Amino acid sequence: MTKHPLVILSFIAAFLWTNCHRSQEKTNPYAHLPQALQELYRQVEKNPDEAKLYLQLSDYYLSHSQLDSALNHVLIAIRLDSTQSEYYLLLSDVYFAQQRIDETEEILEKVIGMDPENKDAYLKLAELHFLHKRYKEAHENISAVLKLDVYNPKAYFIRGWIYKEEGDTMAAIRSYLTAVEQNPDYFEAYEELGIVYHAKKDPLAVNYYTNALNLQADNTQIMYNIAMFYQEKGDNDKALNYYHMILQIDGEHPHALHNIGWIYLVRKDKYEEAVAFFTRAIEADSTYIEAIYNRGLAFESMQRYDNARQDYAYTLKLNDNYMPAIEGLNRLDKAQNR
């Protein structure tokens, strides 16, 4: 049986396309990679002994959490040129990301040995020592930085961290304030000032949270912190404003949804609205035990006892020792004469 000419042409076209595609893969073995990586690998082919190219590759892979590739490429860079402290700094970042803490510290000490005025190495060591509660050593690292550069906002910021963990709140505040004086756009320092004053129940918390929000207008964590501050103060209307701002950015933010539900619940005249927001919170996080229990509480307040019993039972399925749910079931038994 003779094939129709159009069928033959379609076979030819498919054959040509497949072979053309294979040919492109042979001529460009990096075609499957992002454009930035393709260009770097082309440069490596032309300059295989250029250490900085491997450093750039390592930095790329680290930023994309491809840690094995990041490690392989930074080690090649060091093998090609072992005199550059910045290469070892990147190696320390890779080790830290791999949670190889001893190797991280060893490499940072090596950098300081190579370059005793390397502020970045001291700062990284300070962070490392802070995270592992070695506060005395962290203070020493920060002092070393400030001897080299008294106008180093990150050093003051990390010092604030250390003082805060040591329980010296006023010293922490002074350090954070110095950081923002030196860098008025230091988001993290404003955030920490907000957190410290929040813990003191001081209205200055809102001022500093707002400064942080001015720098990152879509930061839902800062909005949540402000909402919580107002809710804790009993200013539920202001709290609701910030919770709704969060939902405009993240409509499935479980904690904002839950807290709106809670505010409606305690108002005692908005039980339906409370149930609706608790339900949305549960849809966003099916294991959100407080949302499930509080929805049950709203149902109980509406005398929808069967619905309440279901939520209390499901709460206990998630945590069989959750006492509020046990007490809720006992209340329902009495209300329904069981």
Image: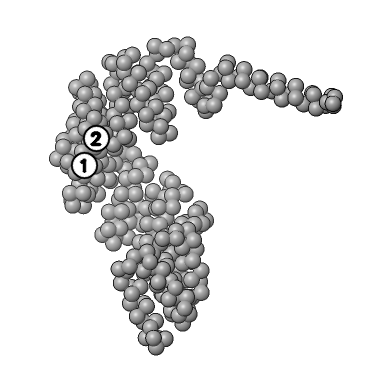
Q: Position of residue 288 (x, y in %)?
A: 40, 62
Q: Which amino acid, mark 2?
A: Ile
SS for dot 1: loop
- Residue at image coords 36%, 82%: 331
Most distant residue in the front direction: 1
In the picture, the quarter occupied by the N terminus is top right
Label 2 sits on a secondary structure element that is helix
Residue 101 has which mark? Answer: 2
Give the Cα separation between the discs numbered 1 and 2.
10 Å
* Front residue (pair 274, 29): 29
Res 196 label: none
* The C terminus - image quarter: bottom left
Q: 134 or 138, which is in the foreground?
A: 134
Q: Is residue 79 above or below residue 294?
A: above
Residue 305 visible in the current orientation: yes
Identify the residue under disc 1. Answer: 132
Circle 1 crowding by C-alpha within 10 Å: few under 14, some 14–19, many from 20: few
Label 1 or label 2, whichever comes before in sequence order: 2
Using the image as rendered, state which of residue 178 and residue 162 is in the foreground: 162
* Position above or below: 100 against 23: below
57 to the left or right of 108: right
